[in-house]
Amino acid sequence: MYGVIIAAHGGYSTGIYSGLKLVCGEIENLKVVDYLENQTYEQLDANLKKAYEECNAYEGVIFIADLLGGIPFSRCALNFGHIENVRVLAGLNFSMLYSAAVIEPSGDMDEDIENILNMGRAGITVYKAN
């Protein structure tokens, strides 16, 4: 199992996690870090570090941020992107998060990450009535 850390602007992390709890119940391997208005980088970094410390006993840690290049993504990449068993993803959606939270590691973290990204992409579509 991977440790999963959601990092996003405002209350998006908390909100999407509340939806996931409706589907899965409490998820022990998942931590939430919201980047709130008026929060400093140092405060965000401290919250990310605490979440990482709570997750680093798992086979690897997956950070999932809402926006590529946004502050949560950038702080995750800067502080943790150099660690061998850590991956930092962007484009958070429900399908991606669900997949990351429940995936059983295959032994190849990069392959697992690709599967998580594919699940996120597969969840994006449009409904058109005939």
Image: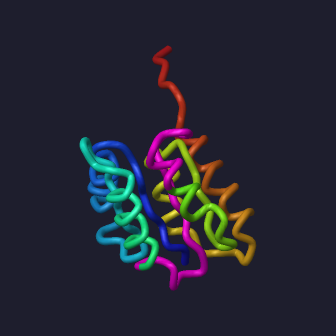
Q: Tell me if residue 74 comes above or below residue 62 in the rendering.
A: above
Q: Tell me if residue 125 comes above or below residue 49 in the rendering.
A: above
Quadrant the N terminus occupies: bottom right
In this image, 112 relative to 40: left or right?
right
Scheme by which the image is coloured: rainbow
Q: Tell me if residue 98 comes above or below residue 122 in the rendering.
A: below
Q: Start and end of the magenta stretch? A: 54-75
Residue at horizontal 36 percent and vertical 57 percent from the top: 44
Can residue 19 be found in the magenta stretch?
no
Q: Position of residue 33 (x, y in %)?
A: 35, 58
Residue, far bottom: 57
Residue at horizontal 35 percent and vertical 43 percent from the top: 9
In this image, 79 relative to 35: left or right?
right
Residue at horizontal 41 percent and vertical 64 percent from the top: 48
Q: How many marks?
A: 0
Q: Quadrant of residue 38?
A: top left
Can residue 69 be found in the magenta stretch?
yes
Q: Position of residue 21 (x, y in %)?
A: 30, 62
Q: Position of residue 119 (x, y in %)?
A: 59, 50
Q: Quadrant of residue 37?
A: top left
Q: Position of residue 114 (x, y in %)?
A: 70, 55
In this image, 88 relative to 45: left or right?
right
Residue 37 or residue 55, whichever sits in front: 37
Residue at horizontal 32 percent and vertical 59 percent from the top: 43
Q: Tell me if residue 100 comes above or below residue 61 in the rendering.
A: above
Residue 81 or residue 55, whichever sits in front: 81
In this image, 49 relative to 82: left or right?
left
